[in-house]
Image (cartoon, rainbow, N blue to C red):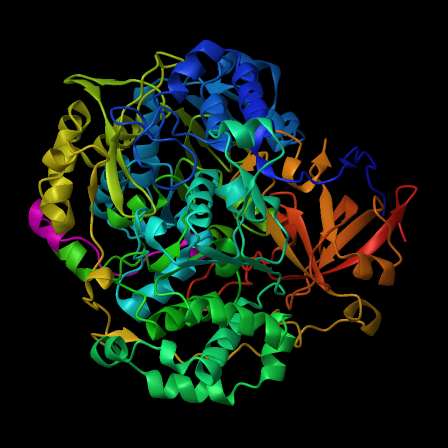
């Protein structure tokens, strides 16, 4: 076997702090790179401001005060979207799809904004221009010719607005299906499942204000310095106020050690920075559940007085069974599975016990394991013990990704819709709607692979690179009879199609949305359940662009007609959509009026009000046993020589990346320059496998289906990571994640728990 040995990545020393002048320089560089710096500087001053637009990056909340409400990666997202470069039919006249498949994801998106609707011509292997009316008619023809409605899959990216997401699910359900695979199925699905069972609501119970009052903040499986940079300002403020931040993350991330605010002149211009973490622990991948179990065990042994007995008695059930389980769990098993010592966990327990108000945060480091739901319920158990739900400065905080991924779910993007929601929607529309569960991402891809599903419509995103098991995912897309991609930029999802395919270009978050009644605004929900308006301020890059709302309405009208809904009326004035949302969802009562408040309005949280809307009717202590294996490999047939070399790999983002969008080839905070095919490894693991810093390796994953999943030309980088664990960037490592390796109850890909072995490459050969 040979490989194309062209890995030019280099390594340098990690910086001593995150943020600071380097962050400012990176921001300015991204603005200049967009080729319209003056426009983007104006846009940045409108980002996350009242009467401005919501950043197209992460879902972290904003105070709506002060001139600067954006971060380095938010600036990159805005500049990346607001480029002057465009792609139209002339671009595709010069490039076949087969040629484009050979290009990197970075190159594809760097070509610029999609500027006109396009249809794939299989004979030429090229996209060609198509009118909007013909595109809508083509989609309607395919959908109306299907044997049954569940052969259609309606995928959603978290960037879609509340208005677009609502009419998207409205169209899908009037069409007759609940097939709504969503990007959240691949990230925080475990959070929603776990919290819904335990406390009756699948959202976090805190608001941004709570971070100002917390005595302690426990951060699990998260790298906010790159993935949610605005969160760093909240953590910095808390740390400087004396709050103790306890971090559990298997990689030592510089932002969680020392952070310099670019808005602080001293920290910007000098070596000074704020120490973020009071204590920093590096558990094994998947060992967080055992770590929390250890904290609880230490609390019961040494700090029983820290338990809030009144809260437990009044608001919970299941404590006795849970305490019995904790007592039966040995310290040896806790230490072995977590990778942390008793002293480590007793230190963490001491901080928790001596804090009156505690917040627990987490992200995908916890949600992408087989036992993710159980892990999040273990954290919930910890917080219930102290009555840390519904108390100012305390609670549970799953830190969401895309800027409206939580809002999408709130307004109906859900393959398992609550019965009350469907009943309300049916009543308002005076039309019965389907209640049977539809497909999530996992089931949609499996159905496309088997060719049971035939049409895929994607409202944004890049499912080809977001989903696991790349070759099988590509095949699933290639099996479609029609692949429709509503997008701002070219990506790999546009390059895998079956009989027919469309690319439909939409407005970006920064652009003015003009409809017949005037300029429109849309709304989004942040990770704290705050809903606020977003209104673009720059001219669209092309007159051919349509809003997401207009595109969905155009498809719906062509497919269903106007009998049940006047789709053109919804497009003309988005307040008509918000009126429908208000009529169907009680938490959006007086939607339009409440948006007048600076910063929007709070949807509320039943658990924070001590209303427990789960089956138990109370907050539930879940007694989940620790997993038998962090990575389930005992049943996999494997040679002893390979089994002895197995490591557990996680996929992750670089600092120059947001979700599947790659902004550049560097990862400043981890010392990586000019490349992405990197595998971070503990020095002792490298030594045992006779590998040195900079060696090239082929990575092979193992799974019970015995399919060979392999990537080559990855450069080894020695790093501060627990023994037995390795890490690599996605989507480059996605081919290694088995499609059928999913979380219990969540069906989330286990992208943080992939069993792999390494083979050294020399002279283009694998040894």
Q: How many marks?
A: 0
Magenta run includes residue 442: yes
Please tell me which residue lies in front, 537 or 146.
537
Looking at the image, can residue 212 be seen? yes
Give residue 222's position: percent from left, percent from top.
Answer: 52, 52
**Residue 197 to residue 490: above or below:** below
Left or right: 421, with 12 as reference point: left
Is residue 452 in view from this perspective?
Answer: no
- Residue 39, above or below 579: above
Please say if 197 is above or below 482.
Answer: below
Residue 157 location, quadrant: top left
Going by the image, does 59 lie left or right of 218? Answer: left
Between 423 and 206, the one lying in front of the other is 206
Which sits in the foreground, 551 or 502? 551
Residue 169 to residue 369: above or below: above
Residue 490 in percent (x, y) is at: 51, 27
Taking the spot 26% from the left edge, 49% from the top edge, the residue there is 410
Left or right of 119? Residue 594 is left
**Residue 3 colored magenta?**
no
Residue 356 image position (x, y, % from top left): 35, 65
User: Which residue: 66% across, 40% down?
Assistant: 16
Q: What is the x, y in percent for residue 443? A: 43, 57
Residue 143's quadrant in the figure?
Answer: top left
- Which portion, as a residue range, is magenta? 424-444
User: At x 64% / y 52%, what residue is drawn?
Assistant: 252
């Amino acid at each position: 076997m040979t490989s194309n040995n062209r890995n030019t990545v280099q390594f340098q020393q990690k910086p001593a702090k995150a943020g600071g002048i380097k962050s400012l320089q990176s921001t300015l560089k991204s603005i200049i790179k967009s080729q319209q710096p003056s426009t983007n500087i104006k846009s940045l001053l409108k980002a996350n401001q009242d009467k401005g637009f919501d950043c197209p990056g992460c879902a972290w909340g904003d105070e709506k005060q002060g001139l600067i409400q954006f971060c380095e990666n938010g600036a990159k997202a805005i500049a990346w979207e607001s480029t002057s470069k465009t792609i139209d039919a002339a671009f595709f006249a010069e490039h076949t799809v087969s040629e484009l498949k050979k290009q990197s994801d970075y190159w594809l998106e760097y070509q610029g904004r999609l500027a006109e609707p396009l249809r794939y011509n299989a004979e030429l292997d090229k996209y060609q221009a198509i009118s909007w009316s013909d595109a809508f008619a083509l989609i309607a023809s395919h959908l109306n010719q299907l044997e049954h409605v569940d052969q259609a899959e309606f995928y959603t990216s978290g960037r879609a607005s509340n208005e677009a997401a609502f009419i998207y699910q409205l169209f899908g359900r009037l069409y007759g299906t609940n097939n709504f695979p969503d990007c959240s199925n691949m990230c925080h699905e475990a959070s929603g499942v776990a919290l819904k069972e335990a406390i009756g609501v699948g959202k976090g119970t805190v608001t941004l204000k709570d971070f100002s009052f917390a005595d302690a903040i426990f951060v699990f499986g998260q790298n906010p310095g790159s993935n949610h940079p605005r969160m760093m300002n909240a953590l910095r403020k808390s740390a400087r106020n004396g709050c103790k931040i306890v971090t559990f993350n298997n990689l030592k991330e510089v932002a969680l050690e020392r952070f310099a605010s670019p808005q602080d002149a001293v920290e910007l211009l000098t070596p000074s920075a704020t120490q973020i973490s009071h204590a920093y622990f590096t558990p094994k991948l998947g060992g967080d559940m055992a770590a929390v179990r250890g904290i609880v065990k230490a609390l019961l042994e040494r700090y029983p007085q820290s338990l809030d007995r009144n809260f437990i008695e009044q608001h919970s059930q299941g404590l006795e069974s849970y305490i019995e389980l904790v007592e039966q769990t040995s310290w040896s098993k806790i230490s072995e599975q977590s990778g942390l010592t008793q002293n480590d966990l007793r230190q963490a327990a001491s901080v928790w016990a001596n804090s009156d108000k505690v917040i627990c945060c987490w992200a995908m480091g916890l949600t992408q394991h087989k036992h993710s739901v159980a892990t999040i319920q273990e954290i919930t158990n910890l917080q219930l013990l102290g009555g840390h739900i519904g108390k100012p400065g305390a609670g549970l905080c799953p830190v969401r990704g895309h800027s409206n991924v939580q809002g999408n779910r709130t307004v109906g993007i859900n393959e398992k819709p609550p019965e009350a929601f469907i009943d309300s929607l049916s009543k308002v529309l005076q039309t019965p709607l389907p209640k049977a569960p539809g497909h999530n991402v996992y089931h949609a891809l499996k159905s496309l692979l088997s060719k049971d599903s035939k049409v895929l419509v994607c409202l944004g995103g890049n499912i080809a690179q977001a989903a696991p098991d790349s070759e099988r995912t590509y095949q699933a897309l290639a099996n479609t009879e029609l692949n429709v991609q509503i997008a701002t930029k070219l990506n790999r999802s546009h390059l895998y199609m079956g009989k027919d395919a469309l690319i439909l270009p939409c407005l970006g978050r920064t652009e003015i949305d003009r409809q017949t009644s005037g300029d429109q605004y849309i709304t989004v929900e942040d990770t704290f359940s705050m809903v606020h308006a977003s209104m673009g301020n720059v001219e669209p890059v092309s007159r051919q662009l349509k809003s997401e709302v207009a595109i969905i309405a155009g498809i719906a009208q062509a497919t269903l007609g106007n009998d049940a809904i006047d789709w053109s009326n919804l497009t003309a004035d988005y307040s008509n959509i918000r009126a429908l949302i208000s009529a169907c969802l009680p938490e959006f009562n007086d939607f339009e009026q409440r948006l007048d408040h600076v910063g929007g309005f709070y949807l509320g949280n039943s658990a924070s009000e001590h209303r427990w809307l789960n089956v138990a009717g109370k907050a539930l202590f879940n007694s989940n046993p620790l997993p038998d294996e962090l990575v389930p490999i005992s049943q996999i047939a494997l040679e002893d020589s390979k089994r002895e070399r197995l490591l557990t790999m996680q996929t992750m983002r670089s600092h120059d990346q947001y979700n599947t969008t790659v902004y550049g080839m560097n990862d400043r905070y981890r010392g990586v320059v000019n490349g992405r095919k990197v595998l971070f490894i503990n020095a002792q693991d490298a030594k045992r496998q006779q590998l040195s810093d900079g060696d090239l390796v082929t990575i092979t994953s193992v799974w019970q289906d015995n399919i060979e999943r392999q990537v080559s030309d990855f450069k080894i980088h020695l790093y501060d990571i627990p023994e037995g664990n390795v890490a690599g960037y996605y989507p480059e490592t996605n081919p290694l994640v088995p499609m059928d390796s999913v979380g219990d109850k969540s069906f989330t890909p286990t992208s943080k728990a992939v069993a792999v072995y390494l083979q050294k490459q020399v002279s283009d050969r694998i040894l």
